[in-house]
Amino acid sequence: MITGGSNGIGRACSERFAAEGANVLIADLLVDPGQAAVEAIRSTGATAAFVQLEAASQASNEAMAAAALEHFGTIDIVVTAAGISHGDYKSGDVEAGLKRMQQAAEASAVNPAASLIDLDLDDWRRVLDVNLTGTLLAIQSTAAVMLDQDKPGSIVTIASIAARDPLWGSPSYPVSKAGVWMLTKNAARTLAPLGIRVNAIGPGFIETNMTAALGEVDDYNNLVIGLTPMGRKGKPSEIANVALFLASDEASYVTGELIHPDGGWFTG
């Protein structure tokens, strides 16, 4: 089961797991991209289904888990890839992303502390609701099924390099991802005796809808590339490969870890 599975890292995970023979449930707020992802997977001969998910809703997460049982009878693996970079984030809306970046730069030029001092509380709450609370709710709903079925399982959360590096700009995103990291550790310690492993992935800058606007601005794009020792942004498939490892029996003694496929970001 992949939350946020219709595009970016989530879709790459959906396709990678399906290629390995998994039955995949894509859970996403976006219906059309989600159904398109399902059709793409089915066209390869693999099995997939879609359920709409509001990540920050407990009822929606419980319905997601119920849908997995209805379609496939079990939940073995979960990847929580649903996430937003800011409160007004709309996947694929590059123009809005560019406008937001310009506004942030103008505000910072007037007041270098604007991203913190003038932070909109609704923005803060929405990012934490989706990224952090949404991860908690996904873990709760799916781990409950695993425990009820008394069978082992693996949960992979998607954090970020921002879980350890505050980067720049609004604190909402890095705080949410740092929370995902600690939530992962807490869940891993709680669930390990019960046969469920929980690990996190902290991607660097990956070529997705979320980073598309950044790639349109040379100064920002060059800054990111310059800070990445490999000299490039990552591909969603490179994150999916790590998720596949963490979910597999090859990682049978790994839990509570945060792995960074980041092109060397944390080598310094």
Image (tube, rainbow, N blue to C red):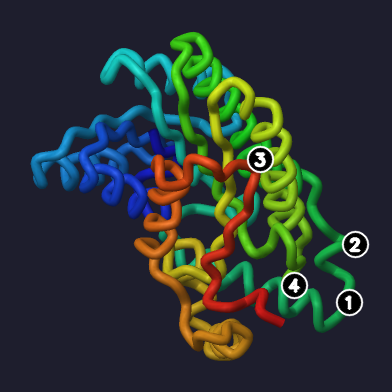
Badge 2 amino acid:
Ile
What residue is rendered at 63% in x and 24% in y? 193
Label 4: few (<14), some or many (≥20) within 10 Å?
Answer: few
At mark 2, the secondary structure is helix
For the point 58% across and 78% down, which residue is it? 264
Which residue is the site of mark 4? 168
Circle 1 or circle 3, nearest the eye: 3
Classify 10 Å Cα crowding around label 2: few (below 14), some (14-19), many (20 and above): few
Query: Mark 3 sits on what residue?
Result: 184
Amino acid beneath label 4: Trp
Q: Which mark is residue 93?
A: none
**Location of residue 76 (image quadrant):** top left
Q: Earlier in the sequence, mark 3 or mark 4?
A: 4
On the image, the x and y values in percent for residue 130 come to 61, 40
The residue beneath circle 2 is 117
Nearest to the eye among marks 2 and 4: give it. 4
Establish if 10 lies above or below 211. above
Q: Is residue 8 at least partly visible in the picture?
A: no
Q: Earlier in the sequence, mark 1 or mark 3?
A: 1
Q: Earlier in the sequence, mark 3 or mark 2?
A: 2
